[in-house]
Amino acid sequence: MRTLIVALTLALLAGCAGILPQGPDRPTTTYVLDPDRPVAGPAGSGPTLLIPPPSAAPGYATPRMAYFKERYRIDYYAHNEWVAAPAAMLGPVLAAALRGGGDFGGVIEDPRGAPPDLRLDVRVDQMHQDFRRQPSVGSVVLTVAAFDPGKGSLLATRTFEATEPAPSEDAPGGVIAINRALARLLPEISAFAADQARRVVRSAPG
């Protein structure tokens, strides 16, 4: 009899749980990549540059915000996300930075247009907050490959990496650190692209 009473009580409580109002789900906070960029200079008259949509290494092709606390293990914040996958946000950021440098006559992101003088393929290898260091840091690692579309040849490949300390040990701190790390890399990528563009111009016939 006691067993029957306990079973009926549990069933009644379970039924009531479906009727009683539930607490609101915690909302998800979204963030963007918006690093500081150099003040844009005048438009250039040099070669044209294509930046196709960047790709991403496994683990980073998602809007989920990644962090590390242990080696070999990637985790994600439960209630904090990027507004889009990092690679999707990175393309426009890179294009804007390269337009502002004044080294190119045009920087395009759509590969369906006229053939450019230079193409940069970019891959997000890392973009996460690393708690294995204290204070935690925002880590950004990008691989950039420069191609001469006219010759169909690879000119150079370079890996760019930077870390910046997080101002707080949480997702907002990680976002600030990642944006600061990316801001450090933008001038380096711009200089790399300009160097490769000069190689293409020097090797052009005529």
Image: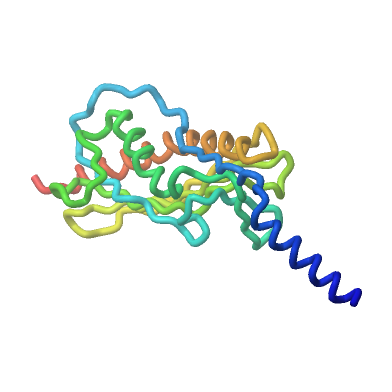
On screen, residue 95 versus residue 159, left or right, reads left
Please tell me which residue lies in front, 166 or 184: 166
Q: Nearer the viewer, residue 144 or 9?
A: 9
Task: Work out whether 14 lies above or below 4.
Answer: above
**Residue 111, visible in the rendered structure:** yes
Q: Is residue 151 above or below residue 22?
A: below
**x, y (%) of residue 15?**
69, 62
Residue closer to the observer: 91 or 183: 91
Q: Is residue 199 visible?
A: no
Q: Is residue 184 above or below residue 76?
A: above
Along the viewing direction, whichever of 47 and 55 lies nearer the viewer? 55
What residue occupies the far right of the structure in this picture?
2
Q: Quadrant of residue 17?
A: bottom right
| Horizontal arrangement in the rendering, residue 71 relative to residue 139 (left or right) | right
Q: Quadrant of the N terminus?
A: bottom right
Name the residue at 60% across, 36% down: 172
Residue 164 is situated, as x and y percent measured from the top left of the image, at 60, 37
Give the residue drawn at x 74%, y 67%: 11
Q: Which residue extends farthest front?
A: 1
Query: Percent from the top left, x then y, of residue 53?
Result: 32, 50
Q: How many marks?
A: 0
Q: Residue at x 33, y 24 (%)?
A: 40
The residue that appears at 23% across and 53% down in the rendered structure is: 148
Here the colouring is rainbow
Quadrant, the C terminus? top left
Q: Position of residue 25 (x, y in %)?
A: 61, 46
Quarter of the figure with residue 175: top right
